[in-house]
């Protein structure tokens, strides 16, 4: 029975901290655009966006 004196404050503290982090993330704009990031990976990368080792050397 004495475990509840430890478990209950820990559970309330974790729930409160999760709520505060969610409120902070919402105010910081983390949930403003949920559609664009998943679609961004479907677009082809241009030569300018590719890493230097991904580019083929010029022929000649």
Image (cartoon, rainbow, N blue to C red):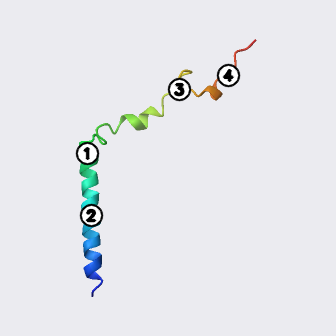
In this view, 4 is above or below 31: below
Disc assigned to residue 15: 2
Q: Quadrant of residue 55?
A: top right
> Around disc 1, counting alpha carbons within 10 Å, would you say few (fewer than 14), some (14 to 19), or many (20 or more)?
few
Q: CA distance from mark 1 to mark 4?
A: 43 Å
In this view, 19 is above or below 25: below
Q: Residue furthest top?
A: 60
Question: In the structure shown, which secondary structural element does the residue marked by tag 1 occupy?
Answer: helix
Q: Which residue is mark 3?
A: 45
The reply to whether discs 1 and 4 touch (Cβ–Cβ < 8 Å) is no
Q: Give residue 39's position: percent from left, percent from top.
A: 42, 34
The reply to whether discs 1 and 2 touch (Cβ–Cβ < 8 Å) is no
- Looking at the image, is mark 4 or mark 3 earlier in the sequence? 3
> Around disc 4, counting alpha carbons within 10 Å, would you say few (fewer than 14), some (14 to 19), or many (20 or more)?
few
Question: In the structure shown, which secondary structural element does the residue marked by tag 3 occupy?
Answer: loop
Q: Residue at x 27, y 60 (%)?
A: 17
Q: Which residue is mark 1?
A: 26
Disc assigned to residue 56: 4
């Amino acid at each position: 029975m004495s475990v509840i004196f430890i478990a209950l404050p820990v559970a309330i503290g974790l729930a409160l901290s999760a709520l505060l982090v969610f409120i902070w993330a919402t105010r910081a704009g983390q949930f403003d655009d949920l559609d664009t990031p998943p679609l961004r990976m479907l677009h082809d990368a241009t030569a300018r966006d590719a890493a230097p080792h991904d580019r083929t050397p010029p022929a000649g």
